[in-house]
Amino acid sequence: MGTRPNSVLLLLVLIVSILLGTDAGVLDNRIDQCNLPDALVQEIRGYQPIVNKIVQRIVGGEFAGKTWESLAELVDTFGARLAGTDQLERTIDWVLERMGRDGLENVHTEEASVPHWVRGFESAQLVAPFKKNLAVLGLGTSVGTPRGGIIADVIAVESFKEFEGLSPVDVKGKIVVFVPKWESYGKTVVYRSKGASVAAKKGAVATLIRSVTPFSIGSPHTGGQDYEEGVRKIPSACITVEDAEMILRKYRRGETLTIHLEMEDRNLEPFMSRNTIAELVGTTYTNYSVVIVSGNGTAAAADDPSDLVDGEELGLWGGRAYKEAHKAEEKKEFNFFFESDIGTFEPRGLDFSGNKEAECIMREIVKLMGALNATEFETPTDGGPDISHWTTRGFPGASLLNKNEKYFWFHHSAGDSMAVEDPKNLDKCAALWAAAAYVVADLSVSIPKDVTD
Amino acid sequence: MGTRPNSVLLLLVLIVSILLGTDAGVLDNRIDQCNLPDALVQEIRGYQPIVNKIVQRIVGGEFAGKTWESLAELVDTFGARLAGTDQLERTIDWVLERMGRDGLENVHTEEASVPHWVRGFESAQLVAPFKKNLAVLGLGTSVGTPRGGIIADVIAVESFKEFEGLSPVDVKGKIVVFVPKWESYGKTVVYRSKGASVAAKKGAVATLIRSVTPFSIGSPHTGGQDYEEGVRKIPSACITVEDAEMILRKYRRGETLTIHLEMEDRNLEPFMSRNTIAELVGTTYTNYSVVIVSGNGTAAAADDPSDLVDGEELGLWGGRAYKEAHKAEEKKEFNFFFESDIGTFEPRGLDFSGNKEAECIMREIVKLMGALNATEFETPTDGGPDISHWTTRGFPGASLLNKNEKYFWFHHSAGDSMAVEDPKNLDKCAALWAAAAYVVADLSVSIPKDVTD
């Protein structure tokens, strides 16, 4: 395009992040009570031609389909890319090379220490009352079983409340299977993140969790989990919705079920990986008023569930490292944060966090996205775990609103692959992202903020 | 209910059948050109109160939810039930016991020789250019690999047409991966059923087939396959949509892919199993004018893909055995055939095959199903593989029209489980089936037929 904005556009690929609760954000239905200066409104409206040009170039021009192709090449070439693996480091090198080739500037990396969890051999089998292999995926940070695995009888419950009613005498030595009904990701994921320690407190030897998804075709969905301090760490894995519900039905009919669980998963010393950074230097403000556009190493198509656990679920380490490294200059330099972390289905608009004045500006900007049919505006943001290091402290930011009703169907499973990505929708998301970031970076004013620390 | 129809209702559980092409049937939009005698029309309309009573009893009365519970108990208790296994024989015994307890008459079995294919250990791994385990399921009747498996480079194609263009020199010694786009089950399944022999003719050592499904969340979908006579039998298995498409993309970028495939699957001597039969003896015609209601051992919820292959895919053996055993009396005794084999989602009505006069009668009968909102009528039948032994020869029959748009999402995969079945819809299907069968069996006339041999 040859056109560049006034301010720096900074592309930040944070290698580790975490999906926090992602219940539907509260739709802001208030009447637009903005009183922006008319000159600013007119300035924003003046971007309509350039927004349309960006959109046309990405969706209908020479870049059409290119985003999908590049992403496919990345996931097909490197496969699973857990933090701590050579595949991830080689992927970072590949991205750096591509960013340089694409003409981005100041392409570099910054050190980021990340947890190093290794998924080893994993196997679960119902051994009584009949034999059935259970598709299983260990949860990120889970310890393994002793060599040869654990063979134990099952306690199956639908809720923590039901589990509370059980005596430690009954739970001791058992494998506890949690089979919560899907309510929402935010409400249901607590069984995955906390189940192991809840069960361990009553003497359980392992936990298996019904995959956290509203819909299943026989695949387990993994994710991170947290051991409570001072509680014995027991192996924890997810099984399919189908198997979990079958186990619960059998258990409730009074049958004795026995499971053989073997997991060679283990936690190693932290690994020094890298955040991947590139810039599009602005014409006027060359080293501040930075607009940060963030993704993480696993993006929308991870091609392997083992990848996702490590890439997204171990605790926002990439974002944290970036925050610490740039603490001194953040207030002066950082203007706005974009993050796409909850799907790249058909775009709908922007999901914003920040103060009222910033909101009013972003409401005007999203109105420019008519060519993409993506003019919706919601607040506060739902999603954007990496940038939450800043948005929770008053920096303004936005995540990508998109038609992601089926996001959790694929989330952290073998189904999270290029098959989910539609090339046209991916182009539209890229166009929305590029156009919104361009306008924010080029605008004569910075986006207002109320930073609390 | 205490009410029984004039004629015999015969419940036939055929243990092996095959899902033939199941493209959408042609919706019959012709104006209803029926000229049934008015007395017959009035007689059929007179069944409205009893149809409503049957529906109410099953959907809203003491049987509400019972069908789902019984099916869950069956699949949960016996797990995978391949023909030739002790699990299937024990399941048959359980069904016999239940049928007797439910007050059915002449509960018995009849011998049926079935193919005996055994799924052994199965494993597929992409070993170059990177290592990735490929979820795999051998296809029914597939031979195994030599011990230790086959390690070979890959040829990946999208169609038989593309494969035709390849030289045997290039194919020899390779594992051929067929990655057909989903068009419809009928059109796409040919890659699963014929792929092995097509590839073997050019010297391939094994075939892997993209699962035959329009939608995937990382699960392989198995099914039967047929070796062509005189062609070397090579191992054949299905892999996930996601992995198949990834392999095709990498292959087309010019990469050399190597796969290690190990399958201990094998074909044993035919096994003598049983068709399971029970009757509801009519009040007037106690041993003829039989209305046959057929399912097969795997029904809608199989709980394990290995079950489905064997139960449904090895060639209509149960139906064939029944046909041969009752050849002498079929024309005199057999009135009408019902079969449910393509899902038990929300019912829509009946899908009919037979002559025009029979069609007119069934069009009147389906009008009685207003309480179920299931008054649709289509012809000819799409589905009903077991009863095709008779319907293809002019006997009248019907299969269950239901909202099965997602049927192939679960078909022959680990996702085909109780989680797919909705208790209320299952009740409605049972009610439609029971009511339609009752009316046909009780009607003063037999359903007309034009039997060709």
Image (cartoon, coloured by chain):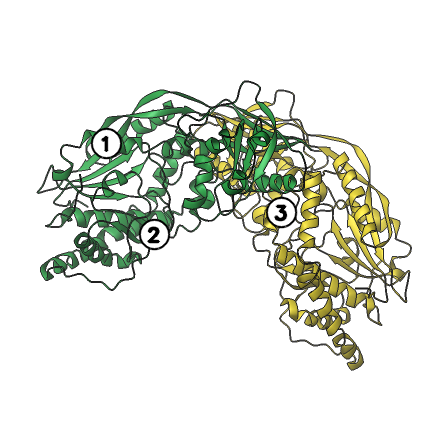
Chain colours: A yellow, B green
Image-based side of A433 in relation to A453, left or right: left
Residue at 27% from the left image edge and 34% from the top image edge:
B319
Mark 3–mark 1 Cα distance, whole angstroms, equals 47 Å
Above-or-below relation of A441 to B385: below
Instruction: Name the mark on residue B322.
Output: 1
User: Given contact means CB atoms under 8 Å apart, are the residues at marks 3 and 2 in contact?
Assistant: no
Q: Amino acid at mark 2?
A: Gly
Q: Position of residue B336 (x, y in %)?
A: 19, 44
Q: Amino acid at mark 3?
A: Met
Mark 2–mark 1 Cα distance, whole angstroms, equals 26 Å
Of residue A131 and residue B453, the one placed in the foreground of this image is: B453
Q: Earlier in the sequence, mark 2 or mark 1?
A: 2
- Mark 3 — on which chain does it sit? A
Query: Which quarter of the image is occupied by the N terminus of chain A?
Result: bottom right
Q: Position of residue A308 (x, y in %)?
A: 67, 42
The nearer-to-camera label among 3 and 2 is 2
Instruction: Name the mark on residue B25.
Output: 2
- Mark 1 — on which chain does it sit? B
Q: Position of residue A352 (x, y in %)?
A: 71, 63
Residue at 76% from the left image edge and 54% from the top image edge:
A294
Residue at 25% from the left image edge and 34% from the top image edge:
B99
Q: Position of residue B382 (x, y in %)?
A: 33, 48
Above-or-below relation of A157 to A359: above
Residue at mark 2 shares a chain with residue at mark 1: yes
